[in-house]
Image: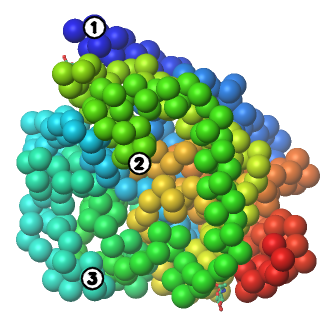
Amino acid sequence: MLFRNRFLLLLALAALLAFVSLSLQFFHLIPVSTAKNGASSKSRKRIMPDPVTEPPVTDPVYEALLYCNIPSVAERSMEGHAPHHFKLVSVHVFIRHGDRYPLYVIPKTKRPEIDCTLVANRKPYHPKLEAFVSHMSKGSGASFESPLNSLPLYPNHPLCEMGELTQTGVVQHLQNGQLLRDIYLKKHKLLPNDWSADQLYLETTGKSRTLQSGLALLYGFLPDFDWKKIYFRHQPSALFCSGSCYCPVRNQYLEKEQRRQYLLRLKNSQLEKTYGEMAKIVDVPTKQLRAANPIDSMLCHLCHNVSFPCTRNGCVDMEHFKVIKTHQIEDERERREKKLYLGYSLLGAHPILNQTIGRMQRATEGRKEELFALYSAHDVTLSPVLSALGLSEARFPRFAARLIFELWQDREKPNEHSVRILYNGVDVTFHTSFCQDHHKRSPKPMCPLENLVRFVKRDMFVALGGSSTNYYDACHREGF
Ligand SMILES: *[C@@H]1O[C@H](CO)[C@@H](O)[C@H](O)[C@H]1NC(C)=O
Ligand SMILES: *[C@@H]1O[C@H](CO)[C@@H](O)[C@H](O)[C@H]1NC(C)=O
């Protein structure tokens, strides 16, 4: 079939592009671990790969395949790179759940037949997959805060349920876990051999896909996955804002942002035409088709190599997909320019960042609890955090995306602590708004913890432009 051939070609092309761009990135990087002493690390030139200022990518299919994050050979990553006189103190990991079944159906079409059971002889595969299933199927005891107890521990439906994690999603996080284990446990000995439950801090939203993603990551990460040492807290809010969710100004930013989105969509006549065509194919009103958010479903078709649906009026096709995806990319670009989403993000991400620096500060005081924190979350969690940190140019969180905060101590100056920020394995520390120019002025290979603390405690609110200097005032600003 023409579609298949073209699809394969595109897939091959995307894989090649991804490989080339990755190789280029790493070609420019001088890994910190090759610096054998402080002197050479000081003279070392830091040439960053620039995920942020890559040439404007216009290929919607290439972008979509990056989003799928189809597991392939182990990727290289920059996590844990530091001069030898730095000691790793704690690690804070934010993940998006792995590949999932769509949340919406395209009306009046057969939904894609994807099997959500976990089987060894189906791709993608991970060597720990069977052990993961057998461990999970033995049950968990009391490892979860209510209501997480009622969720299944791994995906298990022969025809996926809506939003269910797939085998791809499990494998993505087993891989993430294994990668972090090699770096943080084997190389940097983050946890002692006799580690205990209180050295982990685990939190997830109440969806099966986030809990299962967190479990898969931990299963790949921990040397012995002992249910007695696992305790997942439940987070009711996708912003992970716990007790500080009430913030009227944040909601106002969000409403304005949604209005911007709506107006941009109206301006795009090609998009309207495409929705119209697709609506005709599936024989529902255009409004209904649009409300069914077809891109979510189409991405699933693409990520799983299942051809787009057909009816007797015709087929949804790659051209439709490209138009909608291109609009999404344009929408993200305008979102960065208009900065309404930034306002939303600064307020939305404050509670979780505040919690994170609190955890870091306790670790700098020598406390040995919560050395490894895992937040199993959603795109709507990671996206505001990225934006708030000033990483608004970073790509939209792909399936199984990971954003990591590393806390380090300089053994030569034990009172000095530094942070590194990594997004999908790329060191983005010096792209954050609180450490943007730091490496130009200082020979230090990382960002001082104080910079991050100052940002979260005060500068985040200053960035909003009002006169507020704390979360409560910024959330209740009058006349916004
Ligand atoms: C996509 O599906 C076709 C036919 O079902 C198959 O021949 C091909 O190998 C698949 N491609 C990938 C990348 O899995
Ligand atoms: C920030 O964290 C501190 C403890 O580290 C806490 O007392 C304070 O209430 C938090 N603020 C917000 C807005 O979450």
Report whether residue 468 is seen: yes
Side of 215 where 473 appears, left or right: right
- Residue 163, placed above or below residue 453: above
What is the number of the mark on residue 2? 1
Mark sitting earlier along the chain (2/1)? 1
Side of 268 where 285 appears, left or right: left
| View quadrant of ligand 2 | bottom right
Name the image quarter holding the C terminus. bottom right
How many residues crowd around disc 2 within 10 Å: few (fewer than 14), some, or many (20 or more)? few
Q: Nearer the viewer, residue 458 or 141?
A: 458
What is the number of the mark on residue 291? 2
Per the image, label 3 sits on a secondary structure element best described as loop
The residue shown at (43%, 43%) is: 287
The residue shown at (57%, 49%) is: 423
Name the image quarter holding the N terminus. top left
**Would you name the residue on which mark 3 appears?**
147
What is the number of the mark on residue 350? none
How many residues crowd around disc 1 within 10 Å: few (fewer than 14), some, or many (20 or more)? few
- Residue 58, placed above or below residue 409: above
Side of 304 where 15 appears, left or right: right
Report whether residue 78 is seen: no
Q: CA distance from mark 2 to mark 1?
A: 30 Å
> Picture coordinates of residue 183 (x, y %)?
46, 54
The amino acid type of the residue labelled 3 equals Pro
> Picture coordinates of residue 8 (x, y %)?
32, 15
- Residue 154, placed above or below residue 454: above
Q: How is the image coloured?
A: rainbow
The amino acid type of the residue labelled 1 equals Leu
Q: Residue furthest front?
A: 285
